Amino acid sequence: MTEEDEGPPPDRYGAAAPFRAADPDPLLQRALPVAAELPRYRGGTARRDLVAGVTVAALAIPSAMAYAEVAGVDAINGLYALLLPPVAYALLGSSRQLIVGPEGSLAALIAASIVGMTGGRADLAAMLALLVAAFFVLGRLARIGWVADYLSRPVLVGYIHGVAIVLVIGQLGKLLGLSIDASGPLPQLVEVVRKLGGIDWPTVAVGFAALALLLGMRRYLRQLPASLIVVVAAIAASELLDLADHGVAVVGALPSGLPRIELPSVSLSDALTLIPAAAGLFLLSFADEVLTARSFAGRHDQRIRVGSELLAMGAANAAAGLTQGFPVGASGSRTAVNDEMGARSQIAGIVSAVAVALVLLFLTAPIAHLPKAVLGAVIVNAALGLVEPQAWRALARTDRVELAIAAVAAAGVVTAGVLNAILFAVGLSIVDVVRRSARPHDAVLGWSPTAGRWADVAVHRDARVTPGVVVYRLDDRLFFANAGYVKARVREALHAAPSPPRALVIDAEGVAHVDAAGLDALADLQRLDVELYLARIKAPVAARLEDVIAPERRFPTVRAAVTAAAAGSSPSVAR
């Protein structure tokens, strides 16, 4: 009986490829990711999405008005940006929680982009949205989604906590009844401190009462829609107690009606002038959107498809540009509220758009009584929900360098702005990758009877070495950044050998690539006063070594290479 007859026949690949991509989702789900949710959509999920959508709309309406003013356009344009853009994202986006719409960081850049131009501000802002949409579509066609892979976990953690700080600082004026003119978080904080003597105490009472209710319900009544309850109660209390007459700022009257779908009236020269600004807005919006989407997806074991996100954000901005809106992005505060309310599908985003449309048509009067301090309390509550101390503790346990990158990202968001902070933090991540490759993990190996394999002598104290033979293992590429380091480490290993070395065996199983500098390093090692042997070389690497290491000095196993080295010969048939 042969060995194969003793059990089930072994599997074989034959002509089949050893790697195969997962089967793609059905075409309808790839084109419209929300379609995947519909077959299992049930009453409980629908109720949560309905409550979440209405709550997000209640939060988004006054926020969008404020962001529109920051962007240099009328408040009504901010409300228009809450209608079709969320629907476009809901149909095409892969995140189940993300809410898109007007955003503060984008609004400041929009204002800087159109200031001083001769065209109508609303038309210029709408054209800017169309240009941003074009960049998103071009990014999808160019398949630049891989750029998002450089937004590492430390960058993600630092970014989301930096955003939380920015959101809290941005609401201090509303909570304290102060008029804050500064646009950046640190200037805003300085202005708040400078104006503390002008605090409006009725506003403080309203804002902090709302915040206390929100925090209390978060802790003890998490199953209730706290934000919606507080907003509705605040509107009722404001109208009943005439809070506006007591100096408490309210949202104020809203114009009614829906926008027309039309192209903005902008000259060709103005459109060309806006292209660089649109490129910057695209980069900021893309990085912000992917980081936000991934941060919330990670909480629910969901997967974000960057290609779908590029297309969805392009469609959202195109919708904004065609309906007198302005460039939109991911809203961290509204996404946090949406997630907190239990939304589990993008139906909540569609509900929020429908709610905004109904408000614009029929319900502008009640919203006018909403105190802005309550809005600030809702945003602060949502921002506090983004804080995860355990994420920082995990980074501290894993790697202090990653912890530093996260801290730099968080501080950068607050001090230098989102785009600058992300670019700098990503740069630090790349530098960290280079640093790790420049000082790769390596080891001197010996045969461990306990482990039954060639193992690191520094870890396995029972490992035995062959007299006169040093076995060195490299666990990374051999390339320009670490070639000098590897040569120095080999010399140190030879110097530390317990008996005078006459042969060096390099275990190359972990070496996936050797560049020109790496080939030069191997040639230099051959000039040392020892014989050089290689073991377990990968096929692509072996092909590059034809002119550097003779085939008879390359072996399929470490044992075969050590046996040949100890014998002072190099039989190519050794195993």
Image (spheres, rainbow, N blue to C red):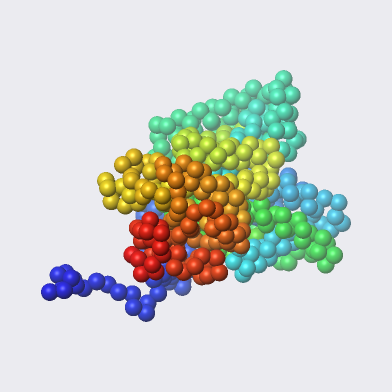
Image spot of residue 239 (x, y percent)? 59, 34
In the picture, measured across the screen, residue 537 lies left or right of residue 166, that is left
In the picture, measured across the screen, residue 105 lies left or right of residue 382, that is right
Q: Which residue lies furthest to the top in this view?
A: 197
Q: Which of 552 and 543 is in front in this view?
A: 552
* Above or below: residue 228 compared with residue 98: above
* Residue 507 appears in view: yes
* Above or below: residue 231 compared with residue 115: above
In what quadrant of the picture does the N terminus appear? bottom left
* Residue 156 appears in view: no
At 53% from the left and 37% from the top, the residue drawn is 400
* Above or below: residue 228 compared with residue 179: below
Image spot of residue 296 (x, y percent)? 49, 48
At 78% from the left and 49% from the top, the residue drawn is 112
Quadrant in the picture for residue 368 = top right
Image spot of residue 224 (x, y percent)? 42, 39
Image spot of residue 422 (x, y percent)? 63, 47
In the picture, measured across the screen, residue 267 lies left or right of residue 34, that is right
In what quadrant of the picture does the C terminus appear? bottom left
Quadrant in the picture for residue 525 = bottom right
